[in-house]
Amino acid sequence: MLIDPRNTKSAFALAQLHIQTGNPLKATELYRTVLRTSTNEDEVAHAGRDAIDLEEMTDSLGELEKVLSPLSFMMAHKPVFRRVLVDLYLRYVPRLVERERHGNEEIKKAARAELARIGGHGLQPLLEALRDENGRAPAARCRGRARAPRQQGRGGAARPHGAPGAAEGFAPHRHARRVDRPRGFASRRWLPPVASAIRRC
């Protein structure tokens, strides 16, 4: 079914239909199209939120990042694109860190390569998001989550840090795992841990 890319209301409705009928890849394309074509901040935020939820479960956050990263630079006058990208890093970077630390050799190698790719451009959106009043909380959460695998629990044992895997079925708002914002967070203090998480490879 072809729809006018400017008709975002129809795009969102059709995406939900694809999800309900087990065609998540068609839904992801619709969300990405909205991200590429819309300049309405509410629509971009809506598409970004739903795309991240869905692509976390289809294990395609890396491909979504390749769409959002250039948009955050091209649309630098629209902070919403940076905020969506920061939210994506919140979900994606900890998963890569976990794979790089605990996967087999092939998984570790792929995770290191992906962290290195993100490290080439991922820090600037985080820094710019800190300058956006509405971007402070998501950027702080992203940095806190990126550091989490390095923290230790009592007795010196590393705290477990599980990354959510692909769930059966596609109902992102039901299954997606959300992360609470750290309390008492001093945002700028966490820039070195984030740089370490996405650049150390």
Image (cartoon, rainbow, N blue to C red):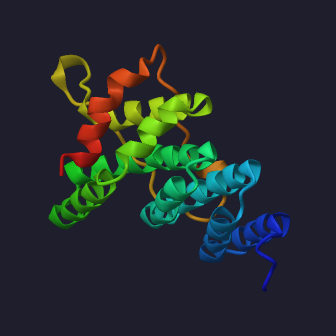
Left or right? Give the position of 87 relative to 49. left
Left or right? Give the position of 15 relative to 87. right
Single out the residue that lies furthest toward the bottom: 1
Where 107 sits versus 184, above or below? Answer: below
Where 200 sits versus 167, above or below? Answer: above
Residue drawn at (66%, 58%), measured in percent from left and top? 171
Where 136 sits versus 129, above or below? Answer: above
Quarter location, residue 104: bottom left
Residue 146: percent from left, percent from top: 35, 38
Residue 37: percent from left, percent from top: 68, 67
- Can residue 49 be seen here? The reply is yes
Quarter location, residue 191: top left
**Of the pair 172 and 5, the residue shown nearer to us:** 5
Residue drawn at (24%, 18%), measured in percent from left and top? 154
- Can residue 159 be seen here? The reply is no
Q: Quadrant of the N terminus?
A: bottom right
Residue 22: percent from left, percent from top: 66, 74
**Of the pair 92 and 194, the residue shown nearer to us:** 194
Residue 33: percent from left, percent from top: 66, 70
